[in-house]
Every structure is written in structure tokens, then in C-alpha cells.
Image: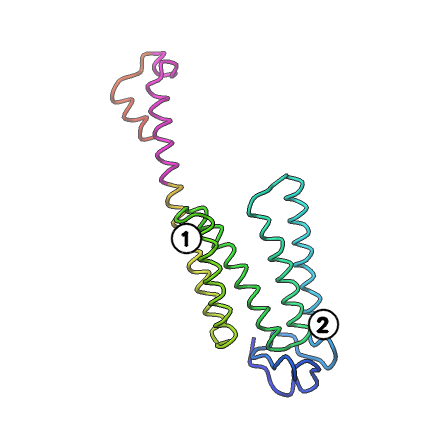
Amino acid sequence: MSQISDLSSACNPYSQNLGKPTIQFAEDNICGYIAQPANTWSNLAYLILALKIAQELRQANNKTLLWGFVPIFIFMGLASGFYHATATFVGQFFDFGSIYLFAAFILFLSLVKLKIWSPRITLILISLITLSLFILLWFVPVLRIWLFATEIIVFLIVEYRIHKIEKLQSKTKFKEDKNISTHSPNNLFNLFGFNSPPLAAFLSLC
């Protein structure tokens, strides 16, 4: 991405009403109603992905929060397609906004799994944060990358916390299963009389 030049948007039919963007991607703008054809049509991939996710969830009779990815990917495809077709500031806003929405949703899923708050409270907090990001994106677009990076960093921190908790729970359950298996009368070692304290200590380390 680079700062867009006035020359590249000189024949843009949308810029007068929707504003000039502050960035430009690799594909150069062309004169016409679709400023960046390749980048525009490539966003059909998001719509195809959304349909594929919906199909898989329906076949699996999945009624979880994962359905949230379907409208989000549709919105990402439409928003990004709108930006690359018009090459305008409004399009840029919705393009980055859709990315923020995606990051907010995966953060929401992680926080629900962490169970710090109820899903309803978590949704309210994430919605307020996302709204704040949208406001900053509109009035201070230069922060666009930093805002997204902040969301991702928070998401990674939450995921790391979940990983630590699940690892601890897994170890605890494994030790409990070991203790049950070692002291069970049906245990192979007990059946043959190998139930000495040293052996039990060795098994606890395995």
C-alpha cells in the first residue's frame, strides 16, 4: 500500500461525492466505473467462502456462534469490492471496517470461551469497542493498521490464556486418570503383584 496520488483518481466518477482514499493497493486505478478490476472481482472469493461455510454448518446441523462467520465474510466481500471498484474514502472506510469486524468477532468467540463474562456482556463490550474503532477509522484513518494490530494482539493474548488453562486442565485430568488406573484392582500391574511404591512413583512420572 502507498499514498494515493491525485493523478490516479483524476477520472474517478465517485471521488467527488465519496471522497478520495488515503491509500492505494498494488493495482493501479483506471478510468471508468470499476477503478481496480482485478482487486474488485477477487472479492467474490469471500462470498464463495461464506456460502461454503453455510453449507458445511447446515450439513453438520451446527447451530453455534460459528454461523457469525457467514454474514461477516459476505460483508467483507461486499465492502472490499466496493472499495476497489470505487477507490474512494467511503469505500476504504468500509473495507477496513469489515476487517475490524472480523477481528472483533474472533475476539468475541475467544472471550466467550474464556468465560470472563456472560456471552451477552461480552457481545456488548465487543460492540462498543468495535464502534469506537469505526469512529477512529473515520476521523483518524492514519491509525487504521494500528487499530487492527491492537485487536489481533488482544486476540492472541486471550488465546494464549485459553491455551494455558486448557493445558492445565488436561494435565489435571490426566493425573486423575493415572491415579484411578494405577490403584484400580483391574490394573495390569496390580494383577501381577507389581504394586510397590517405587513402581507407583515411576508410573506417576510417565
Displayed quadrant of residue 8: bottom right
Look at mark 2 in the image and give the residue it sits on.
Answer: 37
Left or right of residue 131, residue 90 in this image? right
Residue found 47% across the figure and 73% down from its top? 143
Judge by depth and name the residue closer to the eye, 143 or 186.
143
**Residue 161, percent from left and from top:** 38, 49
Query: From which residue to which does the magenta span run?
Result: 168-192
- Kind of element beneath mark 2: helix
User: Which numbered circle lies on residue 62?
Assistant: none
Give the mark nearer the N terminus: 1 vs 2.
2
Left or right of residue 125, residue 64 in this image? right
Which residue ends up furthest to the right in the rendered image? 32
Q: Main secondary structure of the magenta part?
A: helix
Task: Look at label 2 and name its amino acid.
Answer: Pro
Judge by depth and name the residue closer to the eye, 131 or 2.
131
Look at mark 1 in the image and give the residue it sits on.
Answer: 158
- Kind of element beneath mark 1: helix
How crowded pointer 1 is (Cα within 10 Å; few <14, some 14-19, many 20+) is rated as some
Residue found 65% across the figure and 77% down from its top? 87
Number of marks in the rendered image: 2
Task: Look at label 1 and name its amino acid.
Answer: Val
**Residue 141, percent from left and from top:** 51, 76
Tag nearer the camera, 1 or 2: 1
Real-space Cα distance between discs 1 and 2? 38 Å
How crowded pointer 2 is (Cα within 10 Å; few <14, some 14-19, many 20+) is rated as some
Left or right of residue 150, residue 68 in this image? right
**Residue 196, percent from left and from top:** 26, 17
